[in-house]
Amino acid sequence: MTRKSWMAGALFAALLPFAAAVAQPGDGPDGGPHFHGGRHGPDSALLSGVTLTDAQSAQIKTIHQTNWATAKPLMQQLHSTEQQIEAALLASGNVDTAAITALQTTASSLHAQLEQLHLSTELQVRNVLTASQIATAASTHAQVEALHQQMHSLMSAGAQSSTEQ
């Protein structure tokens, strides 16, 4: 695998959960973030199986909107930085390693800021929930994880039996 492919893959893997986490509020049917299945979003584990009051829903929507406003320019700057790295790698001639290293340092800093914002969002949402709602979310999360483990076991067993034939 080339360095460029590895960097692009690593960037994609790192950004995918956060991009879903900060999906622009208002995209979803309830005016909140719109997540496409799976366990996406900064607080998806916290909200799994939880019924929110109207007041809680409004608070969480405000949290998402505020944090989206902070995350959006960071994500745009990160995208621009990654485009600069890609352009430098694809340009003819020698690569200015120092320039790419500086850009990668900037990208790493932006990643760290986005990860911190992601955690902050999760904590803010958690503070809106009651102890009972957190317990419900924990129970739902444990059940989902158990199902994932079962699926993994089934898939692993199937893969092993097909390779033995």
Image (tube, rainbow, N blue to C red):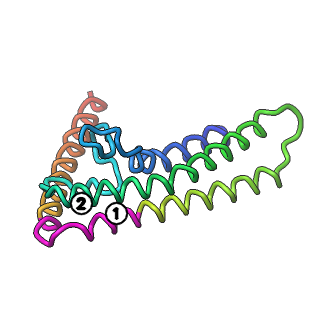
Q: Image point 52% across, 43% down: which residue?
A: 12
* Residue in the picture at 51% in, 57% down: 70
> Is 81 drawn above or below residue 66 in the view shown?
above
Asked if the magenta segment contains residue 142, the reply would be: no
Predominant secondary structure, magenta span: helix
Image position, residue 40 (x, y; %): 33, 47
The residue pinned by badge 2 equals: 46
Along the horizontal axis of the image, is 66 left or right of 110?
left
129 vs 57: above or below = below
Q: Quadrant of residue 127?
A: bottom left
Q: Residue furthest top?
A: 165
Query: How far across and how far down the image is residue 140, in percent?
Result: 14, 56
Asked if disc 1 and disc 2 are in contact, CB closer than 8 Å, the reply is: yes
Q: Position of residue 100 (x, y in %)?
A: 77, 50
15 relative to 81 in the view: left or right: left
Earlier in the chain: of badge 1 and badge 2, it is: 2
The residue at the far right in this view is 93
The image shows residue 53 at horizontal and vertical percentages of: 14, 58
Please state which of residues 153 and 92 is positioned toward the viewer in this rendering: 92
Q: Amino acid at mark 2?
A: Leu
Residue occupying the point 57% across, 53% down: 74
- Examine the image and state in which quarter residue 122 appears: bottom left
Give the crowd class for mark 1: few <14, some 14-19, many >=20 residues within 10 Å.
many
Nearest to the observer: residue 67 or residue 8? 67
Identify the mark at residue 122; answer none if there is no mark.
Answer: 1
> Does the magenta-highlighted stretch encompass residue 130?
yes
The N terminus - image quarter: top right
* Boundaries of the magenta span: 119-135
Element on which disc 1 rests:
helix
